[in-house]
Amino acid sequence: MKKYNITVNGTSYDVTVEEAGEVSAAPASAAPSAPAAKPAAKPVSTGAQGGVKVTAPMPGTIVDVKLQPGAQVKNGTVIAILEAMKMENDIVASCDGTLATVNVTKGQSVETGALIATINA
């Protein structure tokens, strides 16, 4: 065993660390399994995809979907809100037209470049 004195934010702690022998591939104790996650709702889509694609600029989580397919949009209209690094980012239409598809749902995680929606210009 080794003893250490560690200071965290001005508070001193005496710590004793026990050295392990060999490293085993098996876990020391099995943790209870988490309940299965609910499947995400399917994205709303009607008809064919539009010609203009709106993609995620960064990885994050969709916290709100503001419009449904068929909605008229203008350049800059908010389609969805993406939360990344504790900040909410508006995902906006890049042109005037009709929203053809919405390819995400509230609570869905997306990666950079993921298709958010398509627009018929």
Image (spheres, helix red, strand yellow):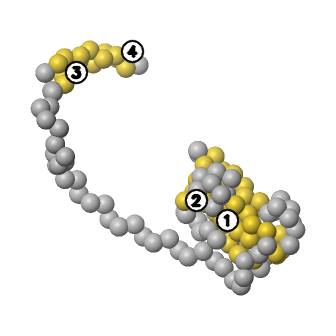
- What residue do we see at 82% from left, 75% from top? 120
Q: Say which amino acid is labelled 1.
A: Ile
Vertical relation: 6 (above or below) 82? above
Kindly indicate whether the residue at mark 1 contacts the one at mark 2 (C-beta within 8 angstroms). yes
Please provide percent x and percent y for residue 88.
Answer: 66, 50
Q: CA distance from mark 3 to mark 2?
A: 42 Å
Whichever of callouts 4 and 3 sits on the residue coming sooner in the sequence is 4
- What residue do we see at 15% from left, 27% from top? 19
Q: How many marks?
A: 4
Q: CA distance from mark 4 to mark 3?
A: 15 Å
**Residue 36, image quadrant:** bottom left
Please provide percent x and percent y for residue 110.
Answer: 58, 59
- Mark 3 — residue? 15
Q: Secondary structure at mark 2?
A: strand
Q: Quadrant of the N terminus?
A: top left
Mark 1 or mark 4, which is nearer to you?
A: 1
Vertical relation: 55 (above or below) 6? below
Pick the residue in front: 64 or 75: 75
Residue found at the far bottom of this picture: 47
Q: Secondary structure at mark 3?
A: strand
Q: Say which amino acid is labelled 4.
A: Gly
Q: Secondary structure at mark 1?
A: strand
Q: Which class describes the residues within 10 Å of circle 4: few (<14), some (14-19), or many (20+)?
A: few
Pick the residue in front: 15 or 110: 110
> For residue 10, which numbered disc appears in the image?
4
Whichever of callouts 1 and 4 sits on the residue coming sooner in the sequence is 4
